[in-house]
Image: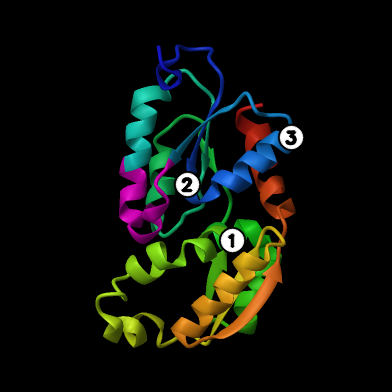
Amino acid sequence: MSPVEAPQGSRPLIVACGALVSELRAVLGGQGLDDIEVRYLPANLHNRPERIVPALREVLAEGGSGREVFIAYADCGTGGALDAFLAEQTGIERLPGAHCYEFFAGAERFAALHEAEPGTFYLTDFLAKHFDVLVWQGLGLDRHPSLLPVYFGNYRRLVLLSQRDDPAVLQAARDAAERLGLEFGHEHTGLAPFADAVAVGLTRRVV
């Protein structure tokens, strides 16, 4: 029997965005929670948030019954559809906030960044490293560069919210800002705000 088909009383399950693989592993390992099963959904759902809830529904239908479950997603562009779906479930919670930028930076810090410049496009370490695939190609800018002002005409700056001190990620984010014609900013968040958000959810549901 595969882990996702485990019977009642089996280990807890986290269903997470594939953009969080490295960070979630680090957080769970640091909290001594390596025994929790984690299922990752494709990171490119960032570009198709309407598909997040159907993908979660499928995973939970296959292997969520009789288990403690935590959803490692914020709203992530579902427009409340994720919360509506979780309201149909019994005691399943998600990460706080509207998106990964908020739970990586922490709600207060993110609110300050947004207030300082609402026209900000954010990148995490993962999105900076995979900018070409998830943003440039994902939005069709490689095929239709004329769409650049349509997507980014109202933005003024790009801010990297970095989880690690990685010069390669920093340079990738700088390059992305240049390609988009935006000012560049950098805020190092570390993993502490994310770890706190995960810890709260796990304490409530799966620990």
Mark whose residue sits in front, 1 or 2: 1
Figure check: 21 above or below 185: above
User: Could you say where residue 135 lies in the image, as x and y percent from the top left?
Assistant: 40, 68
Left or right? Give the position of 158 relative to 105.
left
Nearer-the-camera pick, 14 or 172:
172
Residue tagged 2: 17
Residue found at the very far left of the displayed protein: 143
SS category of the residue bearing label 1? helix
Q: Amino acid at mark 1?
A: Asp
- Is residue 193 shown to the viewer in this render? yes
User: Could you say where residue 17 lies in the image, as x and y percent from the top left?
Assistant: 47, 46
**Quarter holding the N terminus?**
top left
User: Could you say where residue 161 lies in the image, as x and y percent from the top left?
Assistant: 63, 66
**Circle 1 residues within 10 Å: few <14, some 14–19, many ≥20:** many
Residue tagged 3: 31
SS category of the residue bearing label 3? loop
In magenta, the rendered stretch is 41-54
Q: Quadrant of residue 7?
A: top left
